[in-house]
Image: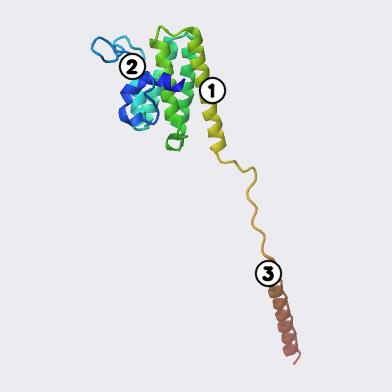
Amino acid sequence: MENKANDTFAFDLENRLDDFFSDSMPAQDDAAGDAPEPSTNDFPLKDLKSTILAIDWEITDDGLDSFLFQVNRLVEEFPDDDAIQKLLKILNSLGKYLRSHKSKAHPDTIKRIMAVYSTLEACVTNGELGQIERKNMLKEEIKQFQRLKSQIVKAAPAKQSHPPKAPAAPDAVLKAINELKSMIRTELKAIRKELKRLADE
């Protein structure tokens, strides 16, 4: 399901994304033998698509801010499409997580953004998709998103509720300290005795 959704996106990513997408589905040929590309004039996802390609190349604050801006713009553009709204919500969550953690984010975050975008593009541009297909694609993306969230939680270091206790001193060290204290007391006692003797003379 994920590979099928990714095909519409793969031609723009070229060799950089070979690890993420497969060529299992043949492209639909036009009269010239090439896959038709949506017109940039009426393609509502073109800015979001460009932004995703940019953050895949380099994660920057400006790129992530632009990504979140484009996602929020599309939320307003498709207010009545439940599947698109949920996919945009997933993209928004992934974008905020990536902006907060940047290079420390889970390594699959960008891959998940691309997969969700591919499903989003299919829902927006493919008029032949039925409601059941759209629903199944959405369910798969939600499933993969929840899986990533679980991986992130498991990878996070556990917070310590109490400060670590100082390691206990070995018995040999404690014994040496006690012996030193005893020797000092003996020496002080001898010094006081000698001072008293000298004072009596």
Q: Secondary structure at mark 3?
A: helix
Distance from disc 1 to disc 3, alpha carbons, whole Å, reads: 57 Å
Rendered position, 103 above or below 11: below
Task: Please tell me the numbered disc located at residue 27.
Answer: 2
Task: Please tell me the numbered disc located at residue 143.
Answer: 1
Q: How many marks?
A: 3
Q: Residue at x 51, y 15 (%)?
A: 136
Distance from disc 3 to disc 2, alpha carbons, whole Å, reads: 77 Å
In the shown orientation, is residue 47 left or right of residue 156?
A: left
The image position of residue 154, as x and y in percent, is 57, 36
The image position of residue 102, as x and y in percent, is 43, 34
Q: Secondary structure at mark 2?
A: loop
| CB within 8 Å, label 3 to label 2 | no
Q: Residue at x 74, y 80 (%)?
A: 189
Q: Is residue 164 visible?
A: yes
Sequence-first disc among 1 and 3: 1
Q: Toward which corner of the image does residue 176 lie, by quadrant? A: bottom right
Amino acid at the residue labelled 1: Lys
Rendered-image quadrant of the C terminus:
bottom right
| CB within 8 Å, label 1 to label 3 | no
Sequence-first disc among 1 and 2: 2
